[in-house]
Amino acid sequence: MPYSWSGHLWGRTHCSNDSNGRFSCLTGDCASSTMECDSGNASPPATLAEFNLNDRSSGLDFFGVSVVNGYNLPMMVAPLVGNDVGDCMTTSCMVHLNKMCPSELKVMSGGDCIGCRSAFQPFSKYSESFKKACPHANVDATKTFQGVCSSTDYLITFCPSSTS
């Protein structure tokens, strides 16, 4: 990433090429028709890794995992060097929310739940259960970045098996 960068990274699932060679995914698609997303954003539902690296005013990195845009897979963002600045800690949503997704929020394909639409309203009846399932993730836009570090590298893991 560039030295001072803000943006999102995400995983896409159920991807394929159509008969004309256009690439697309059922979750996290970016509408580029290619494997590269260029500057496109993830189409919901998509679990996001959010970053604001080397913030211009503080010089710190702010980061977190967000399911405000919906959820498609578990994700973990771990700083590789803890440096005792702020809350330099691993953030994650390790629970498979698709398994507990309420029927009205499910995104289905072939009889399987492949994603869960956002429970983004701060006091929706689902946001509390999602907060309990993913306490180290942004569930409903009431909090922003969960981690604060001085400049370091990060390991982003899709579908992690554990937090250890």
Image: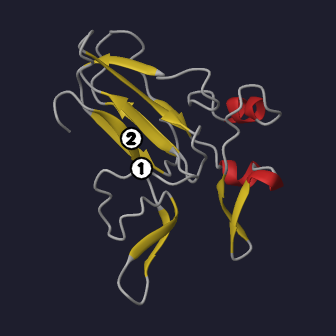
State the residue position of label 1. Answer: 41
Question: Looking at the picture, how far across and down is residue 51, in whole percent?
Answer: 36, 31
Residue at 69 percent of width and 30 percent of height: 131
Q: Please tell me the numbered disc located at residue 89.
A: none
Give the spatial CA distance, label 1 vs label 2. Answer: 8 Å
State the residue position of label 2. Answer: 8
Residue at 69 percent of width and 77 percent of height: 110
Q: Is residue 25 left or right of residue 93?
A: left
Question: Looking at the picture, how far across and down is residue 100, in whole percent?
Answer: 76, 49
Q: Is residue 106 left or right of residue 79?
A: right
Q: Is residue 92 above or below residue 13?
A: above
Between residue 145 and residue 120, name the one nearer to us: 120
Identify the element where label 1 is drawn.
loop
Identify the element where label 2 is drawn.
strand
Question: Looking at the picture, how far across and down is residue 35, in whole percent?
Answer: 32, 67
Q: Is residue 94 left or right of residue 117?
A: left
Q: Nearer the viewer, mark 1 or mark 2?
A: 1
Q: Quadrant of residue 114?
A: bottom right
Q: Is residue 124 left or right of residue 71?
A: right
Type of colouring: secondary structure
**Which amino acid type corresponds to the residue marked 2 in the rendered image?**
His
**Which amino acid type corresponds to the residue marked 1 in the rendered image?**
Asn
Q: Quadrant of residue 55?
A: top left
